[in-house]
Amino acid sequence: MRTRELESSPALPPLYAKAALGLIPGGGDELPDEALELAEATVDAEALADYARVCGFALRDTLPPTYPHVLAFPVSMCLMADRSFPFALLGLVHIANRIEQRRPVPVDARPSIRVWAENLRPHHRGRQVDVVAELSLGGEAVWRGQSTYLRPGQGSGERPERAPDPFDGVEASAVWEVPGDIGRRYAGVSGDRNPIHLHPLSARLFGFPTAIAHGMWTYARALASLDGQLPPAHTSRVEFRAPLRIPGRARLMSRRREGGWDLALCSPDGEHRHLELAVDC
């Protein structure tokens, strides 16, 4: 796979405009044959503080484990907005994420960012693909994030079997009161301005009765509940399941196990599971 170097971090508004106008057709059966690389990314201290406040992280001299996803997001969007990407951006569903933090990234570091797509494959509800972002310092890969996106449509029909529920009998460790503006607040600190998270009216255009919380916000806030307990190197894997309508309430369940933690975010009545998160140390 060849690498195309970017001179600067891509501007997001033009990419969103291309997606909204249907100028990114998608629908191919091949992955892009190039990776995108930004040689040097910088962290804005004020933007980082805002992100930490919205997601519940304490301010430290290293980045929260989910923040590199924000740094890499413009590069990822640039890759996904290219005509060589197999799916159109409109209608894509972010269904899972995996973050491998090999060592913390200092706030004052200037990491390189490389993004590529891999593993185009069937899903029982359509087709899916992984967009991988990697941050490196001095030639060493220190952080890797894998975002899995679903294009709903003709699926394989083979729903995978679910393992026994590890949260049977687990009591809630916290109850979240999620405000109606959390989608806009997260968009402001992440740059991810998907209309389904911003306002009830824009969410209805895409079939949702009201706005829903951003999956990466729920992921970050759940990880923030372990802030101060995570070792420098760890891996977390999340599945985004039922949407969390906002404003709303949710129960966070967590349990310590050998080698890490399991967390789940559920509706107050327990009928819906918004996410499941496993952290391995």
Image: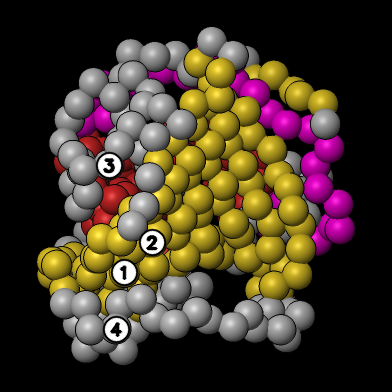
Does the stretch in magenta take in 33? Answer: yes
What is the basis of the colouring in this image? secondary structure
Q: Nearer the viewer, residue 93 or 124?
A: 124
The mark nearer the N terminus, 2 or 1, is 1
Q: Is residue 275 above or below residue 77?
A: below
Which numbered disc, 1 or 3, marks the residue closer to the eye? 3
**Mark 4, other Cα within 10 Å: few <14 / some 14–19 / many ≥20:** few
Q: Secondary structure at mark 2?
A: strand
Q: Secondary structure at mark 3?
A: loop
Q: CA distance from mark 4 to mark 3?
A: 24 Å
**Mark 3, other Cα within 10 Å: few <14 / some 14–19 / many ≥20:** some
Q: Nearer the viewer, residue 26 or 39?
A: 39
Q: Which residues are magenta?
A: 21-49
Query: Seen in the image, is 156 located left or right of residue 202?
Result: right
Q: Secondary structure at mark 1?
A: strand
Query: Seen in the image, is 219 located left or right of residue 2?
Result: left
Residue type pointed to by label 1 = Ala
Which numbered disc, 3 or 2, marks the residue closer to the eye? 3
Q: Position of residue 76 (x, y in %)?
A: 59, 39
- Principal secondary structure, stretch drawn in magenta: loop
Q: Is residue 262 above or below residue 274?
A: above
Residue named by callout 4:
168
Q: Position of residue 124 (x, y in %)?
A: 68, 79
Regarding residue 88, the answer to whether it shows in the image is no
Residue named by callout 1:
264
Q: Residue at x 33, y 53 (%)?
A: 260
* Residue 5 position by quadrant: top right
Residue named by callout 2:
277
Regarding residue 1, the answer to whether it shows in the image is yes
